[in-house]
Amino acid sequence: MTEQLRRRGPRAYGDAPPLLGHLVREDGSVGAALLHTPPFSLRTTPLTAGETEALVTALLDLGHTVPGFAAERDTAEAFVAAWERRTGVPARLGERQRLYRLAELTDPSPMPAGRARVAGETDRELLVRWYGGFVEDAGLHGGRDGGDWADFRLSYGGVTLWETPDGTPVSMAGVTPTVGGQARIAPVYTPPELRGRGYAGAVTAQVSRAALAAGVGELLLFTDLANPTSNALYQRIGYREVTDWAEYHLGDAA
């Protein structure tokens, strides 16, 4: 999200301006960071219970509308408890995610027939359509325009396709721009009628290998904990658990 703000400006995600902040501890060190790009949820790095209380107080003092909150699970639960206590506004658990980091890449076995290739301009219509399918499957709201997403990813080779031996694309995996030596694999999508054939694992392994070859120091990805198939898949190809995240939907306390 910060990369999109840098590239496209403060209105990258909508008319409301973003909110960015950081926590300075008593010794002068920066202990946490905050990012809110409406209409999405507010996000922070891990906080202590006391820091979470202080954040809720600061947000209420600012009169800042918080439609949702997403963070490492313990931080998210502490924030929601403090928010409900202070505002009387109930929270609803949305998506539970798990953050993975690539340890040692392993190709899926068996590998499906076909090959990987980087998507090009002639694939734009396909990318727009598949991005729409991914957004619908994930239940995302207020997401980016599919055409804008496709154009940005195509500008730096940010989507890899798996295609069958006859050249038919059957799955895609994207990779974000590298920031601070890190990149994230997202999105991964296979049309419903083509699932269960190993295409997603194959294309994810290949896009991960290409990212490592390009010098990415750390590869990350998020999965929905409600989807045991994807969680098992990424572990089989070498991704290891880092931490669990939770996203809560909040009412308007104003």
Image (cartoon, rainbow, N blue to C red):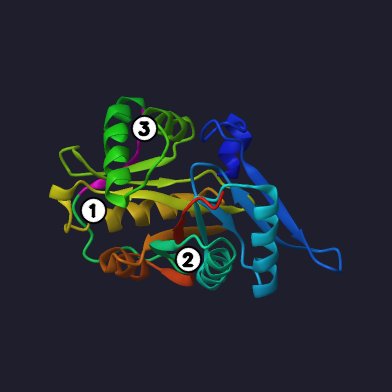
* Position in image of residue 71 (x %, y %): 53, 62
Q: In which quarter of the view is residue 150 placed? A: top left
Q: CA distance from mark 2 to mark 1?
A: 27 Å
Considering depth in this image, is 205 or 178 the residue closer to the camera? 178
Q: CA distance from mark 3 to mark 1?
A: 22 Å
Considering depth in this image, is 73 or 146 the residue closer to the camera? 73
Q: Residue at x 53, y 65 (%)?
A: 84
Task: Of the two numbered discs 2 and 3 on the same chain, state the one appearing first in sequence.
Answer: 3
| Closer mark to the observer between disc 2 and disc 1 | 2
**Segment tinted magenta in the rendering:** 114-120
> Which of the numbered marks, if any, corresponds to residue 137?
none
- Above or below, 234 against 169 in this view is below
- Above or below, 154 against 242 in this view is above
Task: Please name the residue that numbered disc 2 is placed on.
Answer: 245
137 lies left or right of 37: left
Task: Of the two numbered discs 2 and 1 on the same chain, state the one appearing first in sequence.
Answer: 1
Q: Residue at x 64, y 51 (%)?
A: 180
Task: Please name the residue that numbered disc 3 is placed on.
Answer: 146
> Which of the numbered marks, if any, corresponds to residue 199?
1
At numbered mark 2, what does the secondary structure look like: helix, strand or loop? strand
CB of mark 2 within 8 Å of CB of mark 3?
no
At numbered mark 3, what does the secondary structure look like: helix, strand or loop? helix
| Closer mark to the observer between disc 2 and disc 3 | 2
17 lies left or right of 22: left
Residue 100 shows in the view: no
Q: CA distance from mark 2 to mark 3?
A: 26 Å
Dot 2: few (<14), some (14–19), or many (≥20) neighbours within 10 Å? many
CB of mark 2 within 8 Å of CB of mark 1?
no
| Amino acid type assigned to the residue bearing label 3 in the image | Gly
| Amino acid type assigned to the residue bearing label 2 in the image | Trp
As for residue 117 lying within the magenta part, the answer is yes
